[in-house]
Image (cartoon, rainbow, N blue to C red):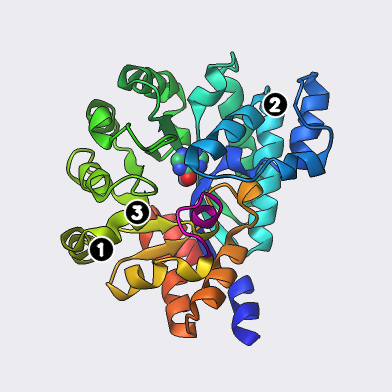
Amino acid sequence: GRLVELLKRAPKAELHLHIEGTLEPEMMLALARRHGVALPYADVEAVRAAYAFTSLQSFLDLYYAGAGVLRDAQDFHDLAWAYFQRAAADGVVHAECFFDPQTHTARGVPLAAVFEGLVAAQRRAETELGLTARWILCVLRHLSEDEALATLEAALPWREHFIGLGLDSSELGHPPSKFQRVFARARALGLHVVAHAGEEGPPDYIRQALDLLQVQRIDHGVQAVHDAALLQRLARERVPLTVCPLSNVRLCVFPDLASHNLRTLLDAGLCVTVNSDDPAYFGGYVADNLVQTVQALGLDARAAWRLLANGFEAAFLDDATRARHL
Ligand code: HPA
Ligand code: ZN
């Protein structure tokens, strides 16, 4: 109906998007051919058929394997440029995107190639699409804190090209407490700080992210509903949650969209935002996430507007960017 059409066109801020998670099967196969990389898939259908996930880890295994086709600056440019074009078509005017340097440096890809490609695409997005993009460097929590610290230090020659530090990958068994020094270092550098917490992990991981890492937003955070005091705190302090409904269903955090707890979080007064996480793997970009969630949960226009407004409230907008979009 009319609400759906309005939602598709409405200006959006995307705050939880892994650029490696925008690698569509077509591009994965094309880059594999370009570089002579062997993939265990004969065609696009075979790639899509492999996307039957049972948990975060079952997804991450394919996601890291897929990222193996990204080799040079051109690849990173092509990946990010394709995403920015899709995002703009979805009404995204501002995107704060994660990238995982360790996934690439571990394969011998120089950090310079990653930044060169991503920053070139970012500049094009701003001039050709009017979309402002920012980069958030994510460290992988299944690796050590020393490796995270070394990654952050190695990225400092490109300090002006990223606005924040994030924490992603396998959550269970890798609590935020493991990364206190690297987050303190990021804060001392004036970076924004965010962390994935409470996707599969317990509410205590969300508390740790707040208390030990002093994050400004929680990525996912849906497990907060199991802790009433934490829920109240998140509402009182208006800590944004970057929720990714289609991701949560694909990774079996909820059995279906109708069972998602987004409405509970919203009704509890939290600053809930809707985002797409790894859209090439989870079956939808941000407009799909928003429309399907509004429909599955029966949200009214007021609640839908709230979700969109929350995205701009939660964004790390500098004054010039804020003036441009609001
Ligand atoms: N969770 C953790 N790590 C990730 C995700 C996610 O949803 N997407 C890409 N890396
Ligand atoms: Zn994520």
Q: Mark 1–mark 3 contact, CB under 8 Å?
A: no
Which region is colored magenta?
A: 247-256
Residue corresponding to mark 3:
221
Instruction: Determine if the magenta segment contains residue 35.
Output: no
Q: Is residue 249 visible?
A: yes
- Mark 3 lies on a secondary structure that is loop
Q: Which residue is mark 1?
A: 238
**Mark 3 CB near ligand 2 (8 Å cut):** no
Is residue 252 one of those drawn in magenta?
yes
In the displayed structure, would residue 174 be above or below residue 317?
A: above
x and y percentages locating residue 120 in the rendered image: 64, 36
Majority secondary structure of the magenta segment? Answer: loop
Q: Nearer the viewer, mark 1 or mark 3?
A: 3
Disc on res. 69: 2
Q: Quadrant of the N terminus?
A: bottom right
Seen in the picture, residue 65 relative to 57 is either above or below; the reply is above
Residue neighbourhood size for the residue with mark 2, other residues' Cα within 10 Å, grouped as few (<14), some (14–19), many (≥20): many
Q: Amino acid at mark 2?
A: Val
